[in-house]
Amino acid sequence: MDEKIFLGGGGPDYGVQQGLALKYANRHGLIAGATGTGKTVTLQILAEGFSKAGVPVFMADVKGDLSGLAKAGSPEHKLHNAFTERAQKIGFDDFSYGACPVTFWDLFGDQGHPVRTTVTEMGPLLLSRLLELSEAQEGILNIAFRLADEEGMGLLDLKDLQALLVWIGENRADLALRYGNISPASVGAIQRRLLVLENQGGTRLFGEPALELSDLMRTEADGRGVVNILASDKLMAAPRLYATFLLWLLSELFEELTEVGDPDKPKLVFFFDEAHLLFEDAPKVLVDKVEQVARLIRSKGVGVYFITQNPADVPEDILGQLGNRVQHALRAFTARDRKNLRMAAETYRENPAFDTEEAIREVGVGEAVTSMLQKKGVPGIVERTLIRPPGSQLGPITAQERKAVIAASSMAGKYDTVVDRRSAYEVLAQRAEQAAQAAEKAEADEVVEAQSPADREYASARRFTGSRVGRSTARRSHKRDTFATAMTAAVIKELKGTTGRRIVRGILGGLFRNR
């Protein structure tokens, strides 16, 4: 029998156990439901199940509740009796409390180990999405990436990209012959978008040391998979940054991992909370990329689970690839809500024992309508399921407990110190300095050419001897020559002018009259 993650009890009396087969866990899934219907607990028990089976997990903690995975639940909890009663009702005989091995991550480095990537790894497509660029602006960003590759300049952090954009703006006339028109206004617009990203804390996302994907795929010595939790409560203040980062991470997994076919269990399970942010106002090229990744990444042993309030938030082409589904209650207060409810019900394999649409509307907190993939990947019949209680703490841990987990982690110290190696910013700064020095030298040579013979003789003698002897005499001569030269030039200039001609005519006229 295939190994499964126990989800809860199904059937009329909830005596039929419902589970997610690990063999089909890499075929993705959906956890949906209105706010307060139990999605977070479902996410928690799935993470516990995968960890116990030796599968590493990555998840974003939007509300801070998932940090409780790092601590075992307690019999003193107010819901202990309710948990025990539910476990007996659904046949969860080996229910016990226990913690998971957890590693905390944070883009801002405050509530976990810092997470960084480079501008080059992010790429122009995702960066354009993050900055909300127009088509013309995205074209200029592609030019920047191409130039960085051709010139061998690394784009590691935002200042590298900003410096390269300045250089492109200054040399746009030459670059236009090869890459097409480069508008200064478009370059300026990109720079302003980068400034906004900086103000949102995006500076901390880009840089080195960059995150190594292998650090997200670790297992403990006892065989349990590590649960990686990204602190996202602050990150959600910049939802576009949140969605773009998670999509980048998913894309990197797709690019770097090798094909494994259909393994007995996933190599990693990726939970994408608030999935509607990924598709909201997304251009078609980006949605196509997500669809491609979702379709192909399962062959690399990665399961992707989207968490959202309504299945309608996920495009149909992607929704059709999500075989394992846990549907909590949906509210139907408006005509649009009723339409979405009906569409959600139609995606399940019908159960003759009840009406699916009605069940989705009526299930209570901690209860769901579930459908898991069965043998040969066939969707199972939809069942009303009472979700099992979690073994880890329900709710967040304290700040002190979080700090203790971070300090004891094997990742402690690896990403803490920022490394700023030579990249595009340093290369362009060096080129600018060399150009400035060359300009100063050329200007100095022009000044030498304009000097009097005495100045040139002194300069030549000084270069030859390297001595300051005779400098005072030459300085006095230089001052006298300079003063005389300046006065002569001024007189000549004045005499050439209109006033000068009047003066000359007046003097000559007076002389002739006297004569």
Image: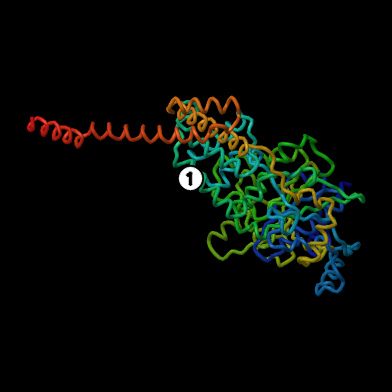
Q: Nearer the viewer, residue 349 or 65?
A: 65
Residue identified by numbered label 1? 189
Q: Nearer the viewer, residue 379 or 126?
A: 126
Q: Position of residue 487 (x, y in %)?
A: 33, 35
Q: Position of residue 242 (x, y in %)?
A: 64, 52
Query: Which residue is located at x 77 percent, y 56 percent?
Result: 104
Rendered position, 286 above or below 236 = above
Rendered position, 241 above or below 489 = below
Amino acid at the residue labelled 1? Ala
Query: Which residue is located at x 13 percent, y 31 percent?
Result: 508
Check the image and tell me how it is coloured: rainbow
Regarding mark 1 in the picture, which secondary structure is present there?
Answer: helix
Q: Is residue 265 left or right of residue 454?
A: right
Q: Position of residue 406 (x, y in %)?
A: 80, 57
Q: To which quarter of the image does residue 155 belong?
A: top right
Q: Is residue 275 visible?
A: yes
Q: Nearer the viewer, residue 144 or 465?
A: 465
Query: Which residue is located at x 69 percent, y 53 percent?
Result: 107
Q: Is residue 351 visible?
A: no
Q: Position of residue 136 (x, y in %)?
A: 48, 38
Disc 1 residue crowd, few under 14, some 14–19, many 20+, Cα 10 Å? some
